Image: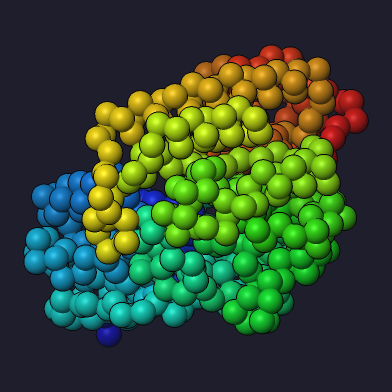
Amino acid sequence: MLKTVKPTIAISHLGCEKNRVDTEHMLGLLVQAGYGVDSNEDLADYVIVNTCSFIETAREESVRTLVELAEAGKRVVIAGCMAQHFQQTLLDEIPEAVAIVGTGDYHKIVDVIERAEAGERVQEVSAEPTYIADDTVPRYRTTNESVAYLRVAEGCDYRCAFCIIPHLRGNQRSRSIESIVTEAQRLASEGVKEILLISQITTNYGMDIYGQPRLAELLQALGKVDVPWIRMHYAYPTGLTPKVIKAMQSTPNVLPYLDLPLQHSHPDVLRAMNRPWQGRVNDKIIEQIKTAMPGAIMRTTFIVGFPGETEAQFQHLLEFVQRHEFDHVGVFTFSAEEGTPAFDLPDQLPEEVKQARRDAVMEVQQEISLKKNQAEVGKVVNVLIEQENPETGELIGRSPRFAPDVDGLVYVSDPNGKASLGDLLPVEITEADCYDLFGTTTNAINER
């Protein structure tokens, strides 16, 4: 009896790291079911495109990818946020799409492929996403061997005026502490050196299943896992309670790195964004963090050009950035997203005004970033080695100051030639520019 050969599948991952985790679970489930997974889309029978629909530019990238694959004659499975957002439109516009899979349905991917193989055009999109994978769902990691993202919760209960995420991802649903720790232990056993905790609002972790935020308890539990670095993303300032700060201070493998999605500084703009609670606490919370954790590394993101943002309100933001001297700042221009309250607000600003304001913030931040990086010169810091330039032999890694993909890098000279990919080793910082650090391996005692 002839054995049926299963099709080969590639996945094109677009968007955020939460989307990446969905991709990794789909790959894991497909491999478990005996499907061949190929990174080369040209050789694959199916290509799953895990799309992003957060802002217009992300949608444009997703559409461009889908069209290119369709024109190449590929059988395309559309997954992720854009599938959730525009399901019927995508099916109508891209006849080559054999299936569409929502953000709460990625765990059904094996069944979807089987149905597509049988000739069905599959539409598997739950109206309200409620699923979140736990430690029992297989993963096929797409990051380098030393780094892994660990999702602690999915969805969001807030309704910021500019944000489509709750519509695409549903309300918050947290995993249990036990499930998260089990997965962290498995990642550590696979050689992972850095675990990045992600969700929409990590400081709200556990509210839905425990009745109150349990981030402090989660960090303390993860402190018992044998992994050198644990980095937390997306910490809303109101959730950084003294209890959470204390847990960060007392848990040696939790890096003092805070990603604070502040969005703006002016109370009136924050009120218009449906974030009125934040306008009262920005300065206070940041000063509390600086006092409690003098060595804290702070990243934040801002939106400029929100409808009705005045020049005075923008100047308030610019002064806020200058006053607090964040280590890293990302700036988005406002994108009017259909389905959000801010989509048809009056006083929409011209694109050139939004772009000019973005450039002004980034220019101010460049000087701050240079100053912060130059303060590292002469220090000996731990660096996680992740890349090697095959031509020069130069090593490239990150220190605790830098999160993957969004922050800078450390370029490392290794005169003795003993360092390898995946090593976490002491490096003396010798130079710095606005974005990156440069240094040499050393035997000196290093910082955390």
Drawn side of residue 301 relative to residue 428, left or right: left
Q: Residue at x 44, y 24 (%)?
A: 360
Residue 182 visible, this angle = no
Quadrant where the C terminus is found in the figure:
top right
Kindly give the residue lying farthest to the right in the view shown. Answer: 445
Kindly indicate the quadrant of the structure image that contains residue 389: top right
**Residue 50 percent across, percent down from the top left:** 34, 59
Closer to us: 200 or 115: 200
Quadrant where the N terminus is found in the figure:
bottom left
User: How is the structure coloured here?
Assistant: rainbow
Kindly indicate the quadrant of the structure image that contains residue 244: bottom right
Kindly indicate the quadrant of the structure image that contains residue 312: top left
Q: Residue at x 39, y 77 (%)?
A: 129
**Where 365 falls versus 172 (above or below)?**
above
Drawn side of residue 14 relative to residue 347, left or right: right
Closer to us: 102 or 334: 334
Q: Residue at x 36, y 69 (%)?
A: 167
**Residue 11 percent across, percent down from the top left:** 34, 57
**Where 302 falls versus 243 (above or below)?**
above
**Residue 445 percent across, percent down from the top left:** 90, 30
Q: Residue at x 73, y 30 (%)?
A: 419
Drawn side of residue 299 relative to residue 74, left or right: right
Residue 406 visible, this angle = yes
